Image (cartoon, grey):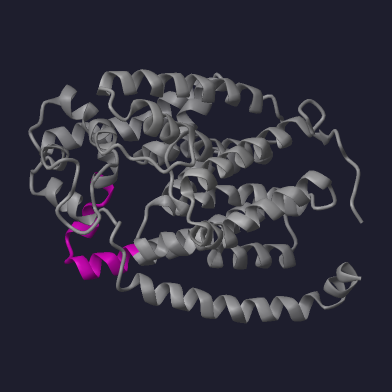
């Protein structure tokens, strides 16, 4: 009955969703114009004044000195942000909002084109992406998550060698972008790995040259700044280890556990890469950062490719589960989390469900034939 109603009135429903989405997106833009606190403008200004912001913030206990811009990103990001440093904060924030708005529309458009989805499904996915809480939060805070996700996608959806080079731009965010270079290694794509790390190395060279810093020390300073803050969110493996096991440990001990986590992630990527479907493989790879390393609510945009793939294959049971799961994280996770107010239980449970979802998809799919093993349909 419900399916018949939705099918019969899908055009009317789509128009209604478009109107609601316009109001929602307009509200998000209005908030972004007066917020954007996480846009890393000030650390970039310090760099181009010849100041090593990593050293400055490490000496200050890991805290920045302008809004919530703590500068815990790779050198390259602050090189790329040079054009924004030519403007005052309010103007730079507005310009970054324009760039982020480009990313929030280009990501679903690229995906829908790659999957050759119908116009109806494409519009629906665009509306979901621009109104879901993770994407709205990214715009509001001026976050770099959309920027990182865009370049993470390129090696999978654009079949050009230059895409592997630009994939290195995603390495500016350690907790997310790492999965791309790790995947190159797991898939034995060593040339692509080397190509992708070139932007990172170029950013590092420019940074220590401009700030007259010791090259070797400066190479590790972004990691030192990130780990020194003891950043943890309760919803990933590293955070749980950091809270219950590593909180009082030294930096070398923490690095050993990070290497161990990388090995676990590497083994999982080998399993995922047995899949021949490039987009499905990308969808699962992008879930890994949410499992292994700290993330905030805005990083759940990485679940969007799985939603797109599942909508294309909606007739299958696992796809329905995927859609329900992603929609929950996009629209209800934050609400339920605040209502319950028991993060120490809720967050680990969310992590467990995320892990179960990943393995359910891996083992519900025939890696060799690109067919669902449990391919019964739900009417």
Q: Pinpoint residue 90: horizontal percent, then vertical percent.
A: 22, 70
> Which residue is at a point 19% across and 50% down the rendered structure image?
44
Q: Pinpoint residue 257: horizontal percent, then vertical percent.
A: 39, 21
Closest to the observer: 58 or 348?
348
53 left or right of 238? Answer: left
> Which residue is at a point 52% across and 76% down the rendered structure image?
24
Q: Pinpoint residue 18: horizontal percent, then vertical percent.
A: 63, 77
Q: How many marks?
A: 0
76 left or right of 45? Answer: right
277 left or right of 134? Answer: right
Q: Quadrant of residue 10?
A: bottom right
177 left or right of 13? Answer: left
Q: Quadrant of residue 21?
A: bottom right
**Magenta span dominant secondary structure:** helix
Q: Quadrant of the C terminus?
A: bottom right
Closest to the observer: 238 or 117?
238
Closest to the observer: 247 or 367?
247
Task: Magenta stretch: give its range.
Answer: 79-96
Examine the rendered structure and indicate whether residue 227 appears above or below residue 324: above
The answer to if 152 sits in the magenta stretch is: no
Q: Quadrant of residue 251?
A: top left
Closest to the observer: 361 or 182?
361
Examine the rendered structure and indicate whether residue 268 appears above or below residue 208: above
Examine the rendered structure and indicate whether residue 324 appears above or below residue 35: above
Q: Quadrant of the N terminus?
A: bottom right
Q: Is residue 115 visible?
A: no
Q: Is residue 342 visible?
A: yes
Q: Pinpoint residue 344: horizontal percent, then vertical percent.
A: 47, 44
């Amino acid at each position: 009955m419900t399916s018949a109603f939705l099918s019969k009135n899908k055009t009317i429903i789509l128009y209604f969703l478009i109107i609601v989405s316009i109001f929602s997106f307009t509200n998000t833009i209005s908030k972004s114009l007066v917020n954007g606190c996480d846009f890393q403008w000030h650390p970039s200004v310090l760099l181009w004044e010849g100041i090593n912001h990593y050293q400055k913030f490490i000496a200050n206990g890991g805290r920045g000195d302008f809004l919530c811009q703590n500068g815990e990103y790779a050198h390259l990001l602050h090189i790329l942000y040079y054009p924004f440093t030519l403007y005052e904060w309010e103007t730079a924030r507005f310009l970054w909002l324009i760039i982020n708005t480009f990313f929030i529309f280009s990501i679903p458009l690229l995906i829908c084109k790659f999957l050759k989805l119908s116009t109806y499904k494409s519009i629906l996915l665009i509306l979901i992406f621009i109104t879901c809480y993770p994407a709205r939060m990214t715009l509001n805070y001026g976050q770099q998550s959309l920027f990182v996700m865009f370049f993470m996608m390129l090696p999978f959806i654009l079949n050009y060698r230059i895409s592997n080079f630009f994939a290195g731009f995603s390495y500016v965010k350690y907790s997310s972008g790492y999965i791309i270079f790790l995947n190159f290694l797991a898939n034995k794509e060593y040339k692509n790995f080397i190509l992708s790390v070139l932007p990172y190395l170029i950013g590092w060279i420019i940074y220590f040259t401009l700030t007259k810093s010791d090259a070797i020390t400066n190479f590790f300073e972004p990691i030192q700044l990130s780990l020194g803050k003891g950043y943890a969110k309760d919803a990933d493996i590293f955070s749980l280890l950091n809270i219950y096991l590593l909180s009082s440990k030294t930096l070398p001990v923490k690095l050993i556990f990070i290497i161990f986590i990388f090995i676990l992630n590497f083994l999982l990527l080998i399993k995922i890469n047995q899949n021949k479907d490039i987009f499905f493989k990308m969808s699962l790879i992008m879930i890994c950062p949410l499992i292994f390393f700290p993330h905030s609510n805005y990083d759940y945009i990485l679940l969007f490719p799985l939603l797109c793939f599942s909508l294309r294959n909606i007739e299958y049971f696992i796809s329905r589960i995927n859609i329900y799961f992603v929609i929950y994280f996009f629209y209800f996770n934050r609400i339920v989390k605040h209502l319950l107010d028991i993060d120490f239980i809720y967050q680990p449970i969310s992590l467990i469900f995320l892990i179960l979802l990943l393995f359910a998809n891996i083992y519900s799919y025939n890696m060799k034939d690109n067919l669902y093993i449990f391919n019964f349909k739900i009417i």
